Amino acid sequence: MRIGLALGGGGVRGLAHASVLEALDELGLKPSVIAGTSMGALVGAIYASGATGREIKDGIRRHHILKEDTWSDVLGKRADLLKWLKAFSPGFSRGGLMRVERFLKHLFAGITRSTFEELDIPFIVTATDYWSAREVVLAKGDLLPALQASVAVPGIFAPVVIDGQVLIDGGITNQVPYDHVLGLADFTIAVDVRRARSPSSREIPNALEAVLGTFDIMQQAALIQKIKHQKPDLYLQTEIRGVRMLDFGKVEKVFAQAAPAVDLLKQQLEKLCTDPPSALRRF
């Protein structure tokens, strides 16, 4: 059975995709095609280049100080931590606060392929054309520019020009791009890692949080409408609270809060593996 996997955007919350991929590996399930946007595109590219879900999680942990780390652990990570800090140092350029090249040059070290054609798994990246306000699908040629475009959050990272198109974050037009794998697989899994909101909260957001939070609201509204017209076979939404898009110091919290959804995914996929027809009807 061919499995199509779609990994949505969500900033640091998108690192939860590593747990989803780890679960698939544990079940012996390998996607036949992957589509990703923003952080989902980055994690998906590393996986499609040959890394396992566990290797991706280990790589993420090497670049962050975790709650259980001892001083010895922190000292052992110091080289990777310094690289990570350098990747996030301000690099003002036209259209953004940070240089996306620094950010991706560091993360791209985990990707062992330079073009879409070299990847082990067929891979699709989505971005948004700023001037036409349309989604752009990238699936061939150089991989790094496509990833740079897909993560170019407006105001944070500068837009990327590819074939004359000025491209920004793919989540603007398609937060979870499962529609691009529906016709390429027998069973489609869509993973949504957007922020779980707290309706009872009355906290006034700061300027950056107001902008990024507004993106979340618009993306959620668009995704709800898409699901009404075209559903994936399995839609997984993580419940991650208290983690903003760029809260990269909260990796441990992301993994912990995503765990219940990942466990549910494993249970559903185990049913699919043991009884495909009835399992498909239940999703």
Image (tube, rainbow, N blue to C red):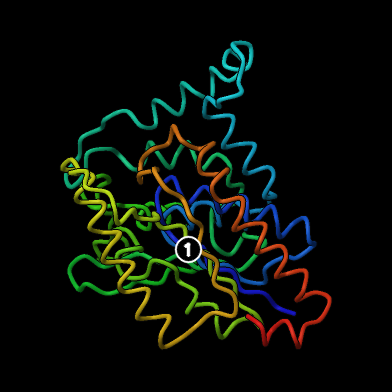
Q: Specify the farthest residue to the front.
A: 200
Reply above or below: 87 against 166. above
Rate crowding at label 1 as few (under 14), some (14 to 19) or many (20 or more) other CA atoms within 10 Å.
many
Q: Secondary structure at mark 1?
A: strand
User: Foreground residue, 165 or 173?
Assistant: 173
Reply above or below: 175 against 211. below
Task: Tally the numbered discs.
Answer: 1
Say which residue appears at 42% left-offset and 36% top-offset. Answer: 248
Q: Specify the farthest residue to the right.
A: 274
Q: Is 109 left or right of 53, judged from the image as shown?
A: left
Q: Quadrant of the C terminus?
A: bottom right
Q: How far across and down, in percent of the image, does residue 185 sit?
A: 63, 81
Q: Is 18 left or right of 133, judged from the image as shown?
A: right
Q: Is 84 left or right of 277, judged from the image as shown?
A: left
Q: Amino acid at mark 1?
A: Asp
Q: How far across and down, in percent of the image, does residue 77 sit?
A: 58, 20
* Residue 282 position by quadrant: bottom right
Question: Where does label 1 land, which residue?
Answer: 192
User: Foreground residue, 204 or 270?
Assistant: 204
Reply above or below: 182 against 202. below
* Residue 170 position by quadrant: bottom left
Say which residue appears at 48% left-offset and 55% top-offset. Answer: 239
Q: Quadrant of the N terminus?
A: bottom right
Q: How far across and down, in percent of the image, does residue 75 sit?
A: 58, 12
* Residue 281 position by quadrant: bottom right
Q: How far across and down, in percent of the image, does residue 29 sit?
A: 75, 65
